[in-house]
Image (cartoon, grey):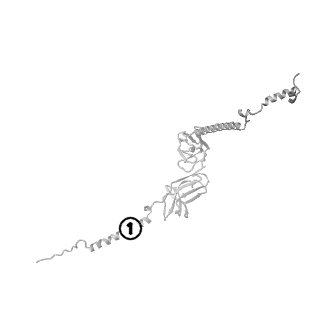
C-alpha cells in the first residue's frame, strides 16, 4: 500500500507568515512610543532640570534683635509659586508661600528673634512640579549677649601683600565660637583657643580689605544666636607704590609748567621790548649829538646860532 504524505509546511516567502509578524510589531512600537510620551511629560526625573533658585537676604543675613529682614528667592519668569522653608529637626518645613507669576519672590520677617533665626532654603513651582531647592541661607540674630572686644596686633594701616591678625575675646562670657564680619565679604568663624579668644588672620590683603570690622561671640549649641557686635575696628589698606608714582607725576608736571612759563616770558620780552634800528638805517640819520653840542655851546656864550655865523673874534 502506498501512502502519500503531504508536506504541510509553507514555502518560503509566504505572505500570510509576514502578516502574522507585522501586526504585533506595529502594536509594540506604538505602545513603546506612547509610554515614552507619558514618561517625558509627566515624570519629573526624566525632564530637563529647572534652574536652581537663588536665595539672598537684604540688607544682611546678620540681623539685630527685633530687626527686620527681606528674603529674596529668584526663580524664572514662568514660576507661578514660591515656597520658603526653614530647617527644623533635620527636616525642612514650610514657612510661607507666594502665588503669582514672578521672577523674584519676597518674604519679609518683621521681627527677628530666636525662633526666626535659622537655616532657610526656597524653591519654586513650574509646569506642575517643584524645582530643586536653593542653597542654604543662614539668618543670624544678634544682641542676646554682651559684646566682645576686637583688637589687632599690628596697626590699622596696612600695605597690599601683608597679613593682618585680629583677636576677638570676652572677659565675662565663655563663648566657644567667635565670628568676624568682613565688609563686603563672608563672615569668618573660629573656635575658641586656649586663651579664650578667637584669632583671625587675613591676608595677603589688598585694597578690597579696607573697611570696618566687628566680631561676635556665640555658643556652638545655638549657632544662629550671637552676641552684640564688638567695638568697630577700621582697617585701611594703602598702595604706597601708586602714591609715590602719583607724587612723581605731579612734580614732573610742575617742572614742565615752570619751564613753559619761562619760555613764554622770554618770547613776550623779545616781541614787546624796544626796537633798536639796524646799523644800515643809522647811516641815514643826522648826527643829532653834534648838533645838540654845538647849540649848547652857542647858547653858553649868549649867541644864537645865526649870530655866531656872522661874527668873528677880534
Q: How far across and how far down the image is residue 24, in percent?
A: 32, 71
Pick whichever, 120 or 272, lies toward us.
272
Residue at the far top: name it.
314
Q: Quadrant of residue 286?
A: top right
In-image side of 266 versus 287 (left or right): left
Q: Is residue 124 visible?
A: yes
Pick whichever, 187 or 94, lies toward us.
187
- The structure residue drawn at horizontal position 79% and vertical position 31%, both measured from the top left corner, is 288
Q: How many discs mark residues in the rendered view?
A: 1
Q: Can residue 171 be seen in this view?
A: no
Residue at the far left: name it.
1
Residue at the far bottom: name it.
1
Question: Is 32 rendered above or below residue 201?
Answer: below
Q: How far across and how far down the image is residue 230, in percent?
A: 60, 45
Q: How far across and how far down the image is residue 32, in percent?
A: 37, 67
Pick whichever, 9 or 139, lies toward us.
9
Crowdedness near tag 1: few (<14), some (14–19) or many (≥20) residues, C-alpha within 10 Å: few
If the image is split into quadrants, where does the C terminus sit?
A: top right
Dot 1 lies on which element? helix
Q: In which quarter of the image is residue 235?
A: top right
Q: How far across and how far down the image is residue 203, in percent?
A: 53, 41
Query: Mark 1 — residue?
Result: 33
If the image is split into quadrants, where does the N terminus sit?
A: bottom left
In-image side of 19 versus 207 (left or right): left
Q: In which quarter of the image is residue 302?
A: top right
Amino acid at each position: 500500500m502506498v501512502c502519500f504524505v503531504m508536506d504541510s509546511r509553507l514555502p518560503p516567502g509566504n505572505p500570510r507568515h509576514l502578516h502574522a509578524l507585522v501586526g504585533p510589531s506595529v502594536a509594540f512600537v506604538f505602545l513603546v512610543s506612547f509610554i515614552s510620551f507619558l514618561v517625558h511629560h509627566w515624570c519629573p526625573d526624566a525632564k530637563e532640570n529647572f534652574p536652581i533658585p537663588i536665595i539672598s537676604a537684604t540688607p544682611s543675613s546678620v540681623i539685630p534683635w527685633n530687626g527686620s529682614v527681606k528674603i529674596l528667592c529668584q526663580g524664572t519668569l514662568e514660576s507661578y509659586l514660591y515656597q520658603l522653608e526653614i530647617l527644623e529637626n533635620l527636616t525642612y518645613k514650610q514657612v510661607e508661600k507666594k502665588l503669582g507669576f514672578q521672577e523674584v519672590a519676597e518674604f519679609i520677617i518683621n521681627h527677628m528673634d530666636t525662633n526666626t533665626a535659622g537655616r532657610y532654603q526656597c524653591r519654586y513651582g513650574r509646569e506642575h512640579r517643584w524645582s530643586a531647592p536653593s542653597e542654604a541661607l543662614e539668618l543670624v540674630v544678634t544682641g542676646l549677649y554682651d559684646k566682645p572686644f576686637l583688637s589687632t596686633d599690628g596697626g590699622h594701616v596696612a600695605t597690599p601683600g601683608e597679613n593682618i591678625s585680629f583677636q576677638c575675646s570676652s572677659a565675662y562670657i565663655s563663648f566657644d565660637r567667635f565670628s568676624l564680619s568682613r565688609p563686603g565679604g563672608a563672615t569668618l568663624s573660629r573656635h575658641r583657643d586656649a586663651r579664650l579668644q578667637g584669632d583671625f588672620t587675613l591676608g595677603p590683603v589688598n585694597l578690597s580689605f579696607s573697611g570696618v570690622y566687628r566680631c561676635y561671640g556665640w555658643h556652638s549649641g545655638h549657632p544662629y544666636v550671637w552676641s552684640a557686635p564688638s567695638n568697630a575696628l577700621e582697617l585701611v589698606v594703602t598702595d604706597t607704590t601708586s602714591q609715590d608714582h602719583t607724587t612723581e607725576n605731579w612734580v614732573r608736571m610742575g617742572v614742565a609748567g615752570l619751564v613753559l612759563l619761562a619760555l613764554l616770558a622770554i618770547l613776550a620780552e623779545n616781541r614787546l621790548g624796544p626796537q633798536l634800528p639796524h646799523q644800515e638805517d643809522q647811516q641815514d640819520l643826522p648826527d643829532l649829538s653834534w648838533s645838540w653840542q654845538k647849540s649848547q655851546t652857542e647858547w653858553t656864550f649868549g649867541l644864537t646860532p645865526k649870530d655866531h655865523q656872522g661874527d668873528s673874534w677880534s
